[in-house]
């Protein structure tokens, strides 16, 4: 609980109250311990203490237990015992102002970002790409940027991948080899990510991180991410939280050391952040952890064992609460020894033994003093929360969501013009142009065919006329000669006109037959050619 004299009072040892000093709260922290030792309640106590001091917090709720922070607590036998031990009279049970968020938009306000804002580094981790595929993804982002194409959701990225694949030859000289195998691997990884529901995470309106920095009636708002479903996709969970940290780091101004932080960020199940993470990304996380405190943000990692966190990052976590660890195997014993060595030793007890002796709700506690040095570790009992311990009902949750100032801001997705629509329009235009060109070629072909047919018919007609005239001339001469030299009776009875008429008729008949025969031979010859 927050007290002007005691500060951020969260634990009580044999020597009295143990508090986090406000100016040192942004020096980060660690809450560690085996399952069932009280980490979640400790997180709730610390978070609501910050809330009472006017500092908003962000935390992931794995099992729904943290939702109770939105309701006032109540006295019970455990709290009565704690009050007697700590000298607390009439605890002021009260809720903390709470907002619920959900990447899937089912149990809280949706939290989205765009493909472009996620960036190739985090997206590569999310898609579990190798170095070659990661290089190709960076090229795709570069080309999209040069062409002014927005990458908002997964269909934008898919369209961009298809475009780069079709035009790979054009970009290989500039950017290096773009293999179809790498494009295909990214497409398959993207499909797998969509099947996990990540398509709901990418889109607009994208989340404004300044909505996490709100205060209500003097209390910092508790921003609770419902993560029971998200935890089934650990890569999405850890990458999403890392994106949030990166956004806070990039957008918040430098403020130096403040009396109290602007925001406390609790990273639960922190080991998921580092499992299978490349060295380049671990270096990036280390940089964010080291520098984000100057932006007024404190990060508190919550995990089972301190060894889950890389040493370079662990060394930056000044405020520590260590719950019990179990040591059933030699490996467990080594982990306990390593955890004990991270504390400033107390001559009154052996830290390594104490870690294994702690009961539920009890912890080894060491906070930074006013000079930024770790205090001697103390064996202490964690305070009880003034809000409800345990989950709330769906009716209570729905009521809180509907009354939130953010209600309606993120709930409806927006799909504006981006890479998918632009590339689709370009492809449709190319298809129309290609169809028009094909139709023009067909028309030219038909016109040429008609012209050829007309020329062929003209040639046939010329052959017919020529054959008829030629045959007619020959036949007419023959028929006239025959008529003149015919029988004497014919000569006597026929005039010259009659003779010519008769010869002409026979000549036409003979010419027609002869011409027909020649035309047939010519046509057949042309066909055979």
Image (cartoon, rainbow, N blue to C red):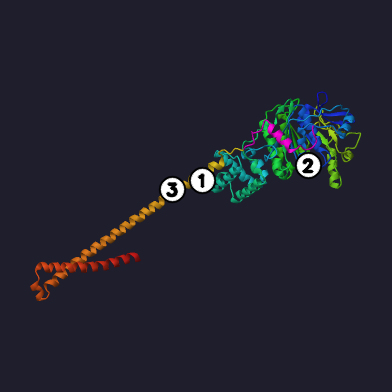
Q: Which of pointers 1 and 2 lies earlier in the amino acid sequence?
A: 2
Q: Which quadrant, please, contains the N terminus?
A: top right
Please say whether residue 529 is visible from this viewpoint: no
Distance in Å between CA atoms under marks 1 and 2: 49 Å
* Res 308 label: 2
What number is the disc on residue 427?
A: 1
Q: Residue at x 21, y 65 (%)?
A: 470
Secondary structure at badge 1 equals: helix
**Would you say 442 lies left or right of 427 here?**
left
Which mark identifies residue 483? none
SS assignment at label 3: helix
Farthest-out residue, front: 395
- Badge 3 or badge 1: first in the primary sequence: 1
Q: Where is residue 370? Give x, y as percent.
A: 81, 26
Q: Quadrant of residue 214?
A: top right
The mark total stands at: 3
Residue at 70% from the left image edge and 26% from the top image edge? 255
Tell me, yes or no, if residue 463 can be seen here: yes
State the extent of the magenta-drawn residues as a range.
387-412
In space, the residues marked 3 and 2 are separated at their CA atoms by 63 Å
Q: Which residue is mark 3?
A: 436
Farthest left residue? Answer: 492
Horizontal side of 380 relative to 266 (left or right) equals right
Pointers 1 and 2 in contact (CB under 8 A)?
A: no
- Give neighbour class at mark 3: few <14, some 14-19, many 20+ (Cα, 10 Å): few
Q: Nearer the viewer, residue 137 or 201?
A: 201
- Rendered-image quadrant of the C terminus: bottom left
Q: Quadrant of residue 227?
A: top right
Element under disc 2? helix
How many residues crowd around disc 2 within 10 Å: few (fewer than 14), some, or many (20 or more)? some
Discs 3/2, front:
3
Q: Main secondary structure of the magenta part?
A: loop
């Amino acid at each position: 609980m927050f007290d002007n004299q005691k500060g951020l009072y969260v634990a009580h040892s044999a020597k009295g109250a143990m508090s986090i000093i406000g100016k040192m709260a942004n020096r980060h922290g660690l809450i560690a311990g085996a399952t069932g030792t009280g980490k979640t309640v400790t997180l709730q106590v610390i978070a609501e203490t910050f809330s009472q001091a006017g500092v908003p917090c962000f935390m992931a709720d794995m099992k729904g237990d943290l939702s109770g922070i939105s309701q006032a607590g109540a006295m019970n036998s455990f709290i009565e015992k704690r009050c007697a031990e700590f000298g607390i009279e009439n605890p002021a049970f009260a809720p903390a102002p709470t907002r619920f968020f959900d990447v899937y938009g089912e149990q809280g306000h949706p939290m989205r970002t765009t493909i472009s804002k996620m960036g190739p580094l985090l997206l590569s981790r999310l898609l579990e790409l190798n170095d070659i595929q990661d290089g190709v993804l960076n090229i795709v982002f570069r080309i999209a940027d040069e062409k002014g194409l927005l990458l908002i959701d997964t269909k934008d990225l898919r369209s961009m991948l298809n475009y780069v694949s079709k035009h790979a030859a054009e970009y290989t000289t500039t950017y290096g080899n773009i293999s179809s195998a790498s494009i295909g691997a990214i497409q398959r990884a993207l499909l797998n990510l969509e099947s996990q529901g990540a398509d709901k995470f990418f889109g607009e309106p994208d989340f404004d991180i300044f909505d996490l920095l709100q205060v209500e009636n003097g209390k910092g708002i508790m921003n609770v991410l419902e993560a029971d479903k998200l935890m089934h996709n650990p890569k999405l969970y850890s990458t999403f939280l890392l994106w949030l940290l990166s956004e806070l780091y990039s957008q918040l101004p430098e403020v130096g050391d403040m009396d109290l932080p602007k925001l406390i960020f609790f990273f639960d199940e922190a080991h998921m952040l580092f499992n299978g993470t490349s060295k380049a990304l671990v270096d990036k996380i280390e940089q964010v952890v080291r520098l984000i405190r100057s932006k007024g943000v404190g990060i508190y990692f919550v995990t089972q064992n301190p060894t889950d966190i890389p040493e370079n990052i662990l060394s930056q976590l000044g405020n520590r609460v260590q719950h019990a660890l179990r040591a059933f195997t030699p490996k467990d014993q080594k982990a306990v020894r390593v955890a004990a060595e991270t504390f400033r030793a107390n001559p009154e007890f052996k830290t390594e033994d104490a870690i294994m002796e702690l009961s539920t709700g009890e912890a080894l506690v060491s906070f930074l003093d006013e000079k930024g040095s770790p205090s001697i570790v103390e064996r202490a009992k964690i305070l009880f929360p003034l809000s409800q311990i345990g989950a709330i009902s769906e009716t209570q949750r729905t009521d809180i969501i509907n009354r939130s100032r953010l209600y309606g801001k993120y709930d409806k997705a927006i799909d504006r013009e981006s890479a998918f629509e632009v590339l689709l329009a370009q492809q449709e235009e190319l298809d129309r142009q290609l169809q028009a060109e094909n139709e023009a070629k067909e028309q030219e072909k038909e016109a040429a065919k008609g012209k050829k047919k007309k020329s062929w018919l003209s040639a046939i007609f010329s052959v017919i006329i020529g054959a008829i005239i030629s045959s007619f001339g020959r036949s007419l001469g023959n028929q006239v000669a025959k008529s003149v030299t015919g029988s004497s009776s014919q000569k006597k009875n026929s005039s010259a006109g009659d003779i010519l008429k008769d010869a002409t008729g026979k000549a036409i008949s003979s010419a027609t037959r002869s011409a027909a025969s020649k035309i047939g031979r010519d046509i057949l010859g042309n066909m055979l050619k």
